[in-house]
Amino acid sequence: MATISIPSFYHATFSAYRFTLLLGLICFFEILSLSVCGQRGEKIKANYYTLENTGNPIDLYFSAKKTFLITTNGIYEREEKKFLKKYTARGAIICALEDDSVFWIGTPTGLLRVNKKTFKSTPVQLPFDDRQPQITTILKDYAGTIWVGAEAYGVYKLQKGTFEKVLGVFPVNAGAVTSDSSVWIGTNTGLHQWKNNQWVRYNEEGVTNFEIPDNVVDKLKVDNKNNLWAVLSEGVTVFEAKSRAFTQEGHIPAVKFIGKPNNTIYSIIYVENQGYVFATAMGLLLLPENKGQLPPLEQSSTSDIVADNQLLYSIKMPGSNSALNSSAHPLLLKTAKRSKIWLIDNQGIQVFTNKDFIKVLQEFKKIKP
């Protein structure tokens, strides 16, 4: 057993295994108002939108000159300085996808299409005789084909106007698409990849190149650098975009946790020349890049030592007014055209220019632990 201690943050005791790497927390930074002065007196500005009773954010879409926010409660459209509700969900929205003139919406009782102009919804039937299943993921691959994950039934693909089952594994927990034309499905029996017209499974008992720390894949997140992050019940693993282009030797990089054990990861973005920002239950965490690359996240397969590497920085950004000051941690991070970075929780939105957000990260990193 190894005991790991990070001053002022937490104590954790756990058994080491070869994928384990402690990403320790260092430093603390807080934005208190609309304009924040850095150590050199530079002002850091952000725009704010207050949200009321919207539910948790699911995704943010930029379509032509419009911006849409989809939450568990409905669909909102930005009009001037407000987000106005355009569609009210009858039940909780679980997942969503923007596709040309419609939004695909996944709910506990089936699949819907919502027109982007009229916001009228139309039920979409999957091939079931009884009631429609809970939808946990909706994807659009690089060929333009729609894929749908039904929690207890498997994965379905829209072909010639009808949905056909293409994967019978269940439960389906999550899905993702990467630019190498892969479709990824997270289940309780491993991570499934559809590429070159065949399924490949990554699991705990897998061989080299196909082994991940745990079989239960809870979430799949693709950052804006096209890396795929698989959040497992016992670990986090990353499939780097560059590495997926060719056959690797060795193990897939993985860590025991991000921040501390059982820390929930909501969203991930890459900030150029800075690193990776995670929206988590602990707040925002920065993993600085190492000369343009991810820092080494994997221990030697023969090592029995837990590395006490302090790699993460904790960033607290509560907002500028009373509503946002009391809000939860950001649940969704998005990058947009014109170099904007959006931070969204269930009470408000903060929008930084890429330049100002980098100032936040740079000033913060100068603080010594």
Image (cartoon, rainbow, N blue to C red):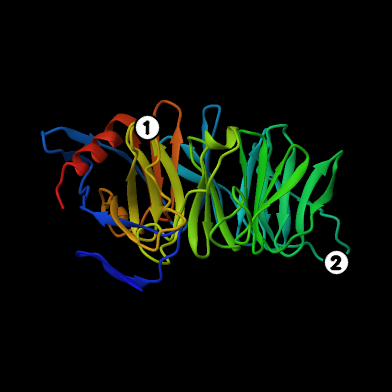
Rendered view: 274 above or below 264: above
Residue 170 x, y percent position in the rendering: 72, 63
Q: Amino acid at mark 1?
A: Gly
Displayed quadrant of residue 188: bottom right
Determine if residue 144 is in view.
yes
Residue 338 x, y percent position in the rendering: 41, 25
Secondary structure under the numbered disc 1 in the rendered image: loop
State which quarter of the image contains the N terminus: bottom left
Determine if residue 55 is in view.
no
Name of the residue lying farthest toward the left:
40
Q: Amino acid at mark 2?
A: Asp
- Judging depth in this view, the residue of 349 and 128 nearest the camera is 128
Q: Residues within 10 Å of mark 1 (few under 14, many from 20)?
A: few
- Judging depth in this view, the residue of 163 and 124 nearest the camera is 163
Residue 282 x, y percent position in the rendering: 34, 60
Displayed quadrant of residue 119: top right
239 left or right, relative to 21: right
- Judging depth in this view, the residue of 78 and 149 nearest the camera is 149
Q: Residues within 10 Å of mark 2 (few under 14, many from 20)?
A: few
Secondary structure under the numbered disc 2 in the rendered image: loop
* Residue at which label 1 appears: 292
| Mark positioned earlier in the residue sequence (1 or 2) | 2
Q: Which mark is residue 130?
A: 2
- Judging depth in this view, the residue of 194 and 45 nearest the camera is 194
Residue 351 x, y percent position in the rendering: 36, 39
Q: Nearer the viewer, mark 1 or mark 2?
A: 1
State the residue at coordinates (32%, 36%): 274
Q: Which mark is residue 67?
A: none
338 left or right, relative to 189: left
State the residue at coordinates (41%, 51%): 51
State the residue at coordinates (59%, 47%): 209
368 left or right, relative to 70: left
